[in-house]
Amino acid sequence: MALNCLATGSIMTHTLTATVQPYLQLMRLDRPVGTLLLLWPTLAALWLAAEGLPPWHLLLVFTLGTFVMRSAGCVINDFADRGWDRHVRRTAARPLTSGRLSERQAMLLFAGLSLTAAFLLVFLNPLARWLALGGFAIAVLYPFLKRWTYLPQVGLGAAFSWGLIMAYASVQDRVPSEAWLLFLASLLWIVAYDTLYAMVDRDDDLQVGIKSTAILFGTADRLMVGVLQLSSILTLLLLGQRLNLGGFYYLGLLACLTLFGYQQYLIRHRRADDCFKAFLNNVWVGFSLFAGVVLDTMLQFQLQT
């Protein structure tokens, strides 16, 4: 009987895993890179807006919101691309494209994630709630941009950077010019790293008709990624001057610049695997910015007290 119970339990566990796993994969919870790319700059914005440790409830809301909205964005992206993903080697096995989940199941999941994000807005001020509506619209529109324009990476940059504007609004109940500088720096950086991501699929995208900055830039792709990366650093330098930030912040930017140089080295031959490694390396860019901001603002707070 004990063996039968163990066998039954194993079957139930296997069945549950087989049922849940496609949902986890659709939300990319098995691949946290995208969430971290969204999380580090958002947390940095909270620290900058608060000039030190932000309120704990905002840390919790924005951390959870990052996971929820990134998951929702992945679901709506795969729904929009369900007819194309089967023609791209890297995406052919995704749950919606491979038939492991239906379109109805995907949209129900998207609705559930959207409602969860809406619930989190209860803990934010009215200005942040209104801004969230704009961010949600951008996130829903982004997946369809690759049909109409070669600049879907700009749409992703705006969607991923909108949380920085909301962070400032939540802490200060306004959106100062410094928030828009941080937004611009983030957008430039995201267009750069998502171009690296698009370089991985460029050959497949050309065959199926998907548009991207990697296709738009052509043989100038490495140059344009470098220009975008340097422009992001210069914007962050301007932000540091505006906010009178100190040495730790600039050390963080130096680390970001060094990582950008490493990414340029990786993509020198434009090999798909190397371009993907360069894309993944941007998690450390985000962390370097976050660490520099936290160390600098906390030091200034200690000096003031």
Image (cartoon, helix red, strand yellow):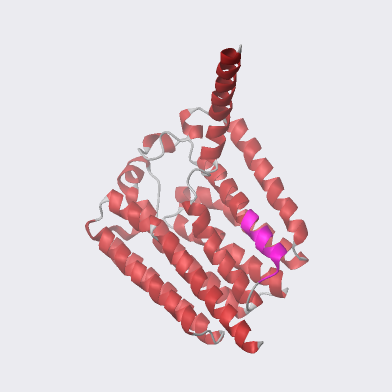
Instruction: Quadrant for the C terminus, please.
Output: bottom right
Quick one: 45 or 79, which is closer to the camera?
A: 45
Q: Position of residue 142 (x, y in %)?
A: 53, 52
Image quarter of residue 63: bottom right
Q: Residue furthest top?
A: 1
Q: Which residues are magenta?
A: 54-64
Q: Is residue 55 magenta?
A: yes
The residue at the point 33 percent across, 42 percent down is 204
Asked whether the viewer can see residue 58, the reply is yes
The residue at the point 65 percent across, 36 percent down is 108
Asked whether the viewer can see residue 155, the reply is no
Can you say whether 57 is above or below 35 in the image?
below
Q: Position of residue 52 (x, y in %)?
A: 63, 76
Quick one: 133 or 61, which is closer to the camera?
A: 61
The residue at the point 38 percent across, 56 percent down is 279
**Residue 260 horizontal side relative to residue 80, left or right:** left
**Residue 68 horizontal side relative to residue 173, left or right:** left
Q: Position of residue 163 (x, y in %)?
A: 61, 63
Image quarter of residue 213: bottom left
* Magenta stretch: helix, strand or loop mostly: helix
